[in-house]
Amino acid sequence: MTEERHKPILPPRSPKLNGHVERVQRTHTEEFYEVTDTGFEIAELNQASLEWGVLYTVRPHKALGYFTPREFLKL
């Protein structure tokens, strides 16, 4: 018989317990969902999300000392 593993379930909006995920969700909300002018069609949202993802990875990030992720990885 296989051992069943239970993953802990964190309460929503619990930054002290799950800070990284909460921060990413905030960033996505503020920089994508609130400013993207798309409908609720999945294909349309997927395309807009892919385009935003490219921009997100090539812009400087404060947490990385204002380097882009690629520049930071080369350090």
Image (tube, rainbow, N blue to C red):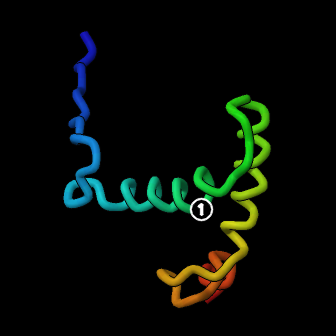
41 or 50, nearer to the observer: 41
Residue linked to disc 1:
31
From the viewer's perspective, tell me whether residue 2 is left or right of residue 57: left
29 shown above or below 59: above
What's the residue at 52%, 90% (across, down)?
65
From the viewer's perspective, tell me whether residue 49 is left or right of residue 8: right
15 shown above or below 8: below
Q: Quadrant of residue 6?
A: top left
Q: Where is residue 39 in the image (x, y as percent from the top left)?
A: 72, 36
Q: In which quarter of the image is the C terminus?
A: bottom right
Q: Quadrant of residue 22?
A: bottom left
23 or 57, nearer to the observer: 23
* Residue type at the position of mark 1: Glu
Crowding near pointer 1: few (<14 within 10 Å), some, many (20+)? few
What's the residue at 73%, 48% (across, down)?
37
Q: Where is residue 27 in the image (x, y as percent from the top left)?
A: 50, 62
Q: Quadrant of residue 2?
A: top left
57 or 31, nearer to the observer: 31
63 or 34, nearer to the observer: 34
Q: Where is residue 28 in the image (x, y as percent from the top left)?
A: 54, 56
Label 1: element kind = helix
What's the residue at 23%, 35% (across, down)?
9
What's the residue at 68%, 31% (across, down)?
40
